[in-house]
Image (spheres, grey):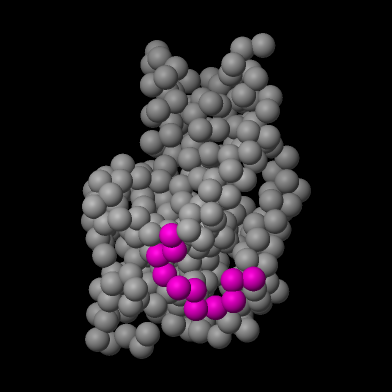
Amino acid sequence: MTVTELVLANEPLIRFAFFIGIFAAVAAAELLAPRRSLTTSKASRWFANIGIVTIDTIVLRLIFSGAAVGIAAAAQQEGWGLLNNTAAPHWFAVVASVVFLDFVIYLQHVMFHAVPALWRLHMMHHADMDIDVTTGTRFHPIEILLSMVIKYAAVVVSGAPPVGVILFEILLNGTAMFNHGNVRIPLGIDRVVRLFVVTPDMHRVHHSVFPFETNSNFGFNHPWWDRLMGTYRAQPTRGHMGMTIGLNQFRDPRELTLPKLLIMPFVGPQGSYAINRRGGRPESEQA
């Protein structure tokens, strides 16, 4: 059995091992070097957020019998997609697929902010009143299903090789937990690191209560898309210690329990966060 075949055969175990390892590392860093003091109950938030990702996993397994890597293997076998119809070396196909899929996720993220109906699903992620490693796993099950459909389409169109898809999934999950981490990184180091990967300070701006900050810094993994597409914002207006996390319409922790998070898209107020309803400057905001 080749290394590639061994990786594909153990893909779920490999991804789970990276998930647990990165989650534990970021959670430990949050205890040792927190960036901000939490404003709400950590136990309550973690119960809700971990409950959400558990439900997401179950729903995905029930509706999609195979992961995106299975679609990649089928596309490779059938000759679907651009990379399966070129003479590009395998290493190039792997790198190109990771970069392409990351750009697709960036565009998907912008779309979930731009379309009011999709924003209703995504606002559950933003309603968290603190931000830490568990926020990076907190997405509504319907959003996760739609994201998987988009990912399947991107894999088929691009012809991404299975190894590239696995690597992309690991990077996406890992960087999502990392850049949502409540971790203090020295500013000098952060300025360098954010040239290559989205840092916690860079992504935290995206979770501000101000809509013009919420609608910036959409990247999860590579930071280049925000710079290229004009959605990059270096720092929050009120600084990381003074900024308010969450959404203006959800400021009561009692309304952010697991059952209420699940029905939030259908009964919760949308607010003015969808891009085509963008709010004003800080002076006009009610934080």
Residue drawn at (48%, 20%) of the image: 84
Is residue 74 inside the magenta stretch?
Answer: no
- Closest to the observer: 35 or 155? 35
Is residue 37 inside the magenta stretch?
Answer: yes
Residue 47 is left or right of residue 41, and the answer is right
Magenta segment main secondary structure: loop
Picture layout, residue 134 above or below residue 14? below
Picture layout, residue 147 above or below residue 114? above
Residue 48 is situated, as x and y percent measured from the top left of the image, at 65, 68
Looking at the rendering, the stretch of residues picked out in magenta corresponds to 33-43
Picture layout, residue 275 above or below residue 219? below
Residue 271 is left or right of residue 2, and the answer is left
Residue drawn at (38%, 21%) of the image: 92
Q: Quadrant of the C terminus?
A: bottom left
Single out the residue that lies furthest toward the right: 62
The quadrant in which residue 19 appears is: top right
Residue 126 is situated, as x and y percent measured from the top left of the image, at 48, 69
Residue drawn at (30%, 46%) of the image: 193
- How many badges with numbers are in the image? 0
Residue 166 at least partly seen:
yes
- Closest to the observer: 207 or 90? 207
